[in-house]
Amino acid sequence: MTTQQTQDQQLRFPEGFAWGAATSAYQIEGAVSEDGRGRSIWDTFARLPGRVVNGENADVAVDHYHRYRDDVRLMARLGLGAYRFSVSWPRVQPDGVGAVNQRGLDFYRRLVDELLGQGIDPWVTLYHWDLPQALEDAGGWPARDTALRFADYAAAVHDALGDRVRNWSTVNEPWCAAFLGYASGEHAPGRREPARAVLAAHHLLLGHGLAMAAMRAQRAGSRIGGCVNLYAVSPLTRSAADLDAARRIDGLQNRLFLDALLRGEYPADVLADLGEAAEGLAEGLAETGDMGVISAPMDMLLINYYSRFTVSGAPGGAVSAAAAPTDTGSPWVGSEHVSFAGSGRPVTGMGWEIDHDGLREVLLRVAGDYPRIPLVVSENGAAFDDVADAGGFVRDPERRDYIEAHLRACHAAIGQGAPLVGYFAWSLLDNFEWAWGYGKRFGLVRVDYPTQRRVPKESALWYAETIRRGGLTGPAQ
């Protein structure tokens, strides 16, 4: 065997590894008033002055609702073996309760059929932040009833698609939905109520557990998991204040969710950090069996990873360049004094530091500190300031290098024992980037928004070749 053949073999991923890309409904579908779809909290939020850069919204987005067949053919040309997408709750249940809107479900039936026809495995996410506005009006995620309604909705979607879809995730990034939505106000519904944000986090996790139970009662064979966004967290210095800051941010960002899902408990130190904001949560838990529902065994854990946090607890510390694009409060309930500092690493167009080894660290931590469970990197990618040529083609070596470095980290983690079974690049398409509007482009495929023309970027062509090979070339890290 030649040296190159040996290197190639070292960098191949396991047989059956899922190679995919991901999107979410509100960011790409558009068609917000078609075929019976109701209003979501993001439809409302995007119309509030000052909440989204340039006052932009996703009424049209990238028009995937009408262009999904072309988009699926594009996925096939890129060689994707899997596609992770979310279902729009208000498209299926306009008010979040009651009768199912069959016209909304029919869109997802057609999409799944199109994917399967092209040999692409559909991975369905049930909630990616587009809560029906009627449920928010009734209290939103801080209200326990929302978790119950989510289970009903999940059962309806699973009943319609479960005969053709094997892989399911429940709630995408509950940290964001709870703390950006209800504490900082950066995301919809834009509330700044720290104690309600803590309840929202609990009910999002409860909704996950109730949905999983409802789906399993319907049909055996579905693989179901929760999805968390995790960060590697480092103290700026070894001072006591900075070490405590790292413990606090790691606790609220990572351990609050991992411990609940995989151990059936909330970390005592995090509850203490939350202080009065957690009092209602603690009282409620004493009277319910919620933690048993939340920690019911999953078939896999989906992990979204983008960056590392470097934090300081010293007074007057520097705030990270990765700040919110609009006027917001702090999402760090009970730890508002913590500041986020740069560590000198290169950054993406979002101001997020690039640290691929943080992904290896996160995967190995979950594999080593918690009960063993198959892991999936369900989002990983980067926005950069893309410049298209006259034909619409984007040379984006920074994005290609970002993905390659993180795939190398995935390979290294597998070699060190992490049970990683899949990787999904974020995102398939340029799209509506929440409070940032359309100015930040994460896509492997460039979308010219005025014409909706799709052009695969250099990174997409590289990723397609990586998928074809089943791995990377060059020496393992």
Image (spheres, helix red, strand yellow):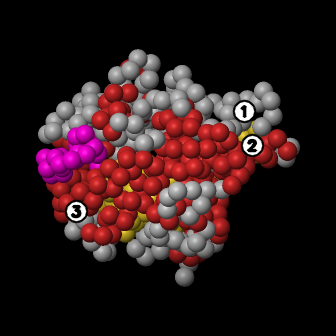
Q: Which mark is residue 159?
A: 3
Q: Indicate whether residue 180 is drawn in magenta.
A: no
Contact between labelled residues 3 and 2, with CB atoms less than 8 Å apart: no
Residue at 61% across / 56% down in the picture? 266
Residue 373 rendering spot, x and y as whole percentages: 52, 71
> Would you place residue 147 above or below residue 352 in this image?
below
Label 2 crowd (10 A; few <14 / some 14-19 / many >=20): many
Foreground: disc 2 or disc 3: 3
Q: Mark 1 points at which residue?
A: 337
| Most foreground residue, 339 or 454 | 339
| Most foreground residue, 447 or 4 | 447
Left or right: 430, with 4 as reference point: left
Tell me the magenta residue range. Answer: 86-107
- Mark 3: which amino acid? Asp
Q: Real-space Cα distance between discs 2 and 1?
A: 9 Å
Q: What element carries label 2?
A: helix
Q: Which mark is residue 74?
A: none
Is tag 2's residue or tag 3's residue first in the polypeptide sequence?
A: 3
> Would you place residue 362 above or below residue 103 in this image?
below
Q: Residue furthest front?
A: 287
Q: Indicate whether residue 106 is drawn in magenta.
A: yes
Contact between labelled residues 1 and 2, with CB atoms less than 8 Å apart: no
Residue at 24% across / 53% down in the picture? 72
Instruction: Look at the image and tell me whether residue 263 can be seen.
Output: yes
Label 3 crowd (10 A; few <14 / some 14-19 / many >=20): few
Residue 399 rendering spot, x and y as whole percentages: 50, 45
Is tag 2's residue or tag 1's residue first in the polypeptide sequence?
A: 2
- Mark 2: which amino acid? Ala
Left or right: 15, with 276 as reference point: left
Residue at 63% across / 30% down in the picture? 321
Q: Mark 2 points at which residue?
A: 245
